Amino acid sequence: MTQPISMIAKSLVRERMRTGLSLAEIARRAGIAKSTLSQLEAGNGNPSLETLWSLCVALDIPFSRLLEPQVQKTQVIRRGEGVKVLAEQANYQATLLATCPPAARRDIYLLTTQPGADRISQPHPVGSVEHIIVTQGRAMVGLTDAAEELNAGDYICYPGDREHLFKALEPDTLAILVAEQN
């Protein structure tokens, strides 16, 4: 069984990494010494309840998250499985591969496309970004007025908050779409 300080140490590191903030910045926001936070993240010390609460406020997390072990799980979705969404005006199918976990803003889809009607997407909320990796075939992808031709293995990232396009250029073109939202 994991000791509480060991679990707290792992949780502090995990949550600080999630925020993208430095050890010094979290310590400053919590009103504690950087060396104190460093020791806690190393699994040393016996933090007071007040120190832990201050860290939770600085990390913007509930207190209970410090005492939750991170659960890693494996999920495999085979080709042809998963929740599918079909476009009405294009031969375009999106298969949801992963949803956005709490406090994160990303969804991952497998796109199965055919030449024909283009998939033109209206702007998503401000700050949205889309990442596409073509895994099979060829496609025109990106902003409607600046789409790029991509081959299998090519990657593109573009603002999803502007009108954008996915046009299959070969039968059975497959791509991975990662949609982020701020």
Image (tube, rainbow, N blue to C red):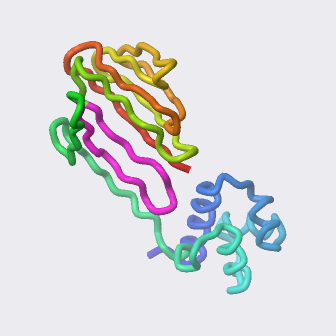
Residue lying at 55% horizontally and 78% vertically, measured from the top left: 4
Q: Position of residue 121 (x, y in %)?
A: 39, 34
Residue furthest left as drawn: 80
Compared with 149, 103 (above or below) is below
Q: Main secondary structure of the magenta part?
A: strand
As drawn, is 10 to the left or to the right of 76?
Answer: right
As drawn, is 84 to the left or to the right of 43?
Answer: left
Of residues 15 and 38, the one nearer the viewer is 15
Image quarter of residue 135: top left
Q: What stretch of residues is rendered in magenta?
A: 92-111
Q: Position of residue 45 (x, y in %)?
A: 71, 76
Q: Position of residue 38 (x, y in %)?
A: 74, 63
107 in magenta: yes
Image quarter of residue 66: bottom right
40 in magenta: no
Residue furthest bottom as drawn: 49
Residue lying at 59% horizontally and 56% vertically, measured from the top left: 18
Image quarter in which the N terminus is found: bottom left
Of residues 20 and 132, the one nearer the viewer is 132
Residue lying at 57% horizontally and 64% vertically, measured from the top left: 10
Residue lying at 36% horizontally and 25% vertically, measured from the top left: 166
Image quarter of residue 119: top left
